[in-house]
Image (cartoon, rainbow, N blue to C red):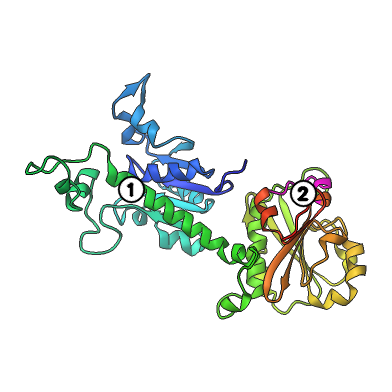
Amino acid sequence: MDKPLQGIRVAEFCSTAAGPFCAMLLADMGAEVVKVEPPEGDALRQWPPITRGFSENFASVNRNKKSVVLDLKDPQSALIARRLALDCDVVVENNRPGVMERLGLGYASLAAEKPSLVYCSISAYGQTGPRAREGGFDLTIQASAGVMSVTGEEGGAPVKCGVPISDFSSGLYGAFAIASALAAVFLVICLALREGGFAAERTASSVSEYQVKAAFVYNFIKFVAWPTGEGSPGGTVRLCVLGDLTDTSSFKDLDGQEIMGKRLNLMFLSEPQEVRNCQVLFLSSSLSRRLPETLEIIRGRPILTIGDTDGYAQRGIMINMYLDKKRVRFEINTEKAEMAGLRISTKLLSLAGTVYGPGRMEK
């Protein structure tokens, strides 16, 4: 069964407990986490108890991760770290404020090149304010937060909690914030697709129907299990625009992007006959008068069509996204998808308005 964050890549620049615990929670939920460590390794690797040469404390907050050694003070290593960060969806770091900026890995620098990057910084006193530059540990945060004052014997001295609750709660809130930020990327799409969902006019001031469709395509390409064999995307996914669309700027933004190792190639076509090895096809409403003829020509070619009406899946298109009374919906032809070797996740099926073929359901 697919995990919720499967397909998400995370670069972790953390040590000790709070940051590593945060990234581990993401890894537990299916994210691919790459932990960047200095040549001497995370200091937690030396903390007892040590069993067969390994720290149990380190293991407890670093499971399900990959690890790479980089000396971030070395310019070449810092460049590799930057490429890694830009190749990920999420960056988690728990250094003192200012450290990542000095290394060329700060949020502003990375976001300028990749605006969609989710960046989580965990520090003792936040990124701004009079105490931002101060360091801190679980003990000092338990003390300054007043936790120790309510722990221990009545009338006795303040006592630290045996478990590093400041570290764990910080990491937990960090993971929750990251998951929320990732959800925001999909929010318009998911709400739009859900039954009784999101009306397009509610975001008319900020998000056009074309932006919603382009965002859906981006995430569809990122998470779909592509078919293999003849006609499969390989290293390039072809996005074709067929007909005259009112707004093409949202789709143009997709051109040249790389998603999960696949480069997007946008093409503008005038006739259905030009659709060959196209995986995603945008259809303008001007083609609705020629719909039967158009679908007959393109049948079995695109994996996903973005149209303005339903019925495409019933006529042989694998997945069709369309507008219905200002609501974005989609339909799936599981039989055609199965024949093409495309695996449709149960999550995607549950959001579909109509499913044709095995697993048919109506909503």
Region rendered in magenta: 337-345
First along the sequence among labels 1 and 2: 1
Front in this rendered view, residue 204 or 329 = 329
In-image side of 207 versus 232 (left or right):
left
Rendered image: mark on residue 359: 2
Tell me residue 212's x, y (percent): 63, 69
* In-image side of 236 versus 18 (left or right): right
Q: Give the CA distance from mark 1 to mark 2.
A: 42 Å
Amino acid type, residue under disc 1 in the picture: Ser
Q: Which is more toward the observer, 298 or 110?
A: 298
The residue at 45%/54% (across/down) is: 178
On the picture, is 17 further left or further right than 227? left
Instruction: Say which element carries label 1.
Output: helix
Residue 77 seen anywhere in this rendered image of the structure: no
Residue lying farthest top? 52
Question: What x and y, as percent, mark residue 138?
Answer: 24, 44
Q: Looking at the image, is 272 positioned above or below residue 8?
A: below
In magenta stretch: residue 42: no
Pointers 1 and 2 in contact (C-beta within 8 Å): no
Q: Quadrant of residue 157?
A: top left
How many residues crowd mark 1 within 10 Å: few (<14), some (14–19), many (20+)?
Answer: some
Residue under pointer 1? 169
Place of residue 163 in the rendered image (x, y in percent of width and height, measured from the top left):
27, 38
At 77% from the left and 43% from the top, the residue drawn is 228
For the residue marked with disc 2, what is the amino acid?
Gly
Q: Residue at x 62, y 74 (%)?
A: 199
Image quarter (top left, top right, bottom left or bottom right) of the N terminus: top right
